[in-house]
Amino acid sequence: MGSDDLFKKRREGRKTRVSKEKKMRAETWLFVCEGKETEPNYFESLLEYANSKSDKKLRYVVKGTGRNTESLVNSIDDFLSFGDDLQKEVNIPYGKIFAIFDKDSFKKGQFNNAIFLAQKKGYHVLWSNECIELWFLLHFMPLKSNITREEYFNKLGNILNHTYEKNDDHFAMLNTPDNLKKAVYSAEQLYKEFQYEGSFAKMAPCTTVFQLIYELESYLGIKL
């Protein structure tokens, strides 16, 4: 085989690989999380539960980065690149991309800018202020006042009947139709209450994770 034929064969092979990857990613949701344990484990659990309730199966990828706010949003580009030793890397989008992070103790500007940046890039932003434990707690009880991370842990510990830790495997208790509906209702009420604050960082306690449950409604088989 001549060099021209070999080059042509390799080029066609690259086109085929890119085409297959584009099709696969178009049908896949990408979740990029701040943490490496709690958030990835939770979203894996939720998505597995959604698929167990539906004949149609959602294809998804969950990544834990150990990054936060703007650095997390910028890191998403790393998960969009596709290529190999024979192929120049190209960015291939996913059907839906979710950026997931908390306010924690980061400065207001960092938090707000990260949300604006993610929205500008067309990502769905699932943020929590102050932490994702707010979303967990709303499955069991409403909350109106802003509390500390330690207080979230204590409240969850009382509900779970053991000391709550970040990497706890307690998600089966969250993933029930009644608890999901309860969490969505409470989170949505908080969001409506704070939505005119003019600053995401001032919206506390608040979380937008409830928006994902609406996205999953047809898979979960629940009516919100």
Image (cartoon, rainbow, N blue to C red):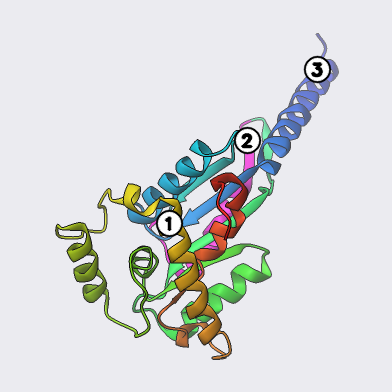
The mark closer to the camera, 1 or 3, is 1
Q: Position of residue 160 (x, y in %)?
A: 21, 58
Is 144 within the magenta? no
Left or right: 89 as drawn, with respect to 78 = right
- The part of the chain drawn in magenta is 65-85
SS type, badge 1: helix
Q: Is residue 151 above or below residue 156?
A: below
Q: Is residue 104 visible?
A: yes
- The kind of residue tagged 2 is Lys
SS type, badge 2: loop
Q: Position of residue 182 (x, y in %)?
A: 43, 64
Q: Which residue is mark 2?
A: 56
- The kind of residue tagged 3 is Ser
Badge number at residue 3:
3
Q: Which residue is mark 1?
A: 178
Q: Residues within 10 Å of mark 2 (few under 14, many from 20)?
A: few
SS type, badge 3: helix
Label 1, label 3: how far apart the Cα atoms are: 64 Å
Label 3, label 2: how far apart the Cα atoms are: 46 Å
Q: Position of residue 206 (x, y in %)?
A: 45, 77
